[in-house]
């Protein structure tokens, strides 16, 4: 499986939906809660090209975007290929 990172906040509904989608696909992820780790906000903003909203999702280090972007990949049938191991 791919390495997935999600910058999130505990009360964020879109964060919950992104995590639920990934869990449904059997994909693990590293959650970075920017509420409990506020020093990580600047890291997220830098990595996400200035985007400050959560979630911000990265697959194998590549910025995917937020939940809407993740869901669009799923609807287009492109998410599974991104979640496959690189050596396949």
Image (cartoon, rainbow, N blue to C red):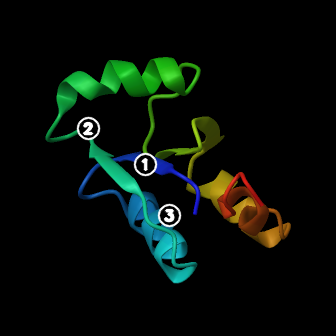
Of 32 and 66, the residue lying toward us: 32
User: Of helix, strand and loop, which one carries label 1?
Assistant: strand
Between marks 1 and 3, how big is the CA–CA gap?
A: 9 Å
Q: Is residue 47 left or right of residue 13?
A: right
Q: Are marks 1 and 3 in contact (CB under 8 Å)?
A: yes
Which residue is rendered at x = 53% and y = 46% of the image?
57
Precedes in sequence: disc 1 or disc 2: 1
Compared with 46, 52 (above or below) is: below
Numbered tag placed on residue 34 in the rendering: 2
Which residue matches tag 3? 18
> Does residue 55 appear anywhere in the picture?
no
Numbered tag placed on residue 6 in the rendering: 1
Question: Where, by quadrant of the figure, is residue 44 drawn?
Answer: top left
Precedes in sequence: disc 1 or disc 3: 1
Crowdedness near tag 1: few (<14), some (14–19) or many (≥20) residues, C-alpha within 10 Å = many
- Residue 15 on image: x %, y %: 41, 58
């Amino acid at each position: 499986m791919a390495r997935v990172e999600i910058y999130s906040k505990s009360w964020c509904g879109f964060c919950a939906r992104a995590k639920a989608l990934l869990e449904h696909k059997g994909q693990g992820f590293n959650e970075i809660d920017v509420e409990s780790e506020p020093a990580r906000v600047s890291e997220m903003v830098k990595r996400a090209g200035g985007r400050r909203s959560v979630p911000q999702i990265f697959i194998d280090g590549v910025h995917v975007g937020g939940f809407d972007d993740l869901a669009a990949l799923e609807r287009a049938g492109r998410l599974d290929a991104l979640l496959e191991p690189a050596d396949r």
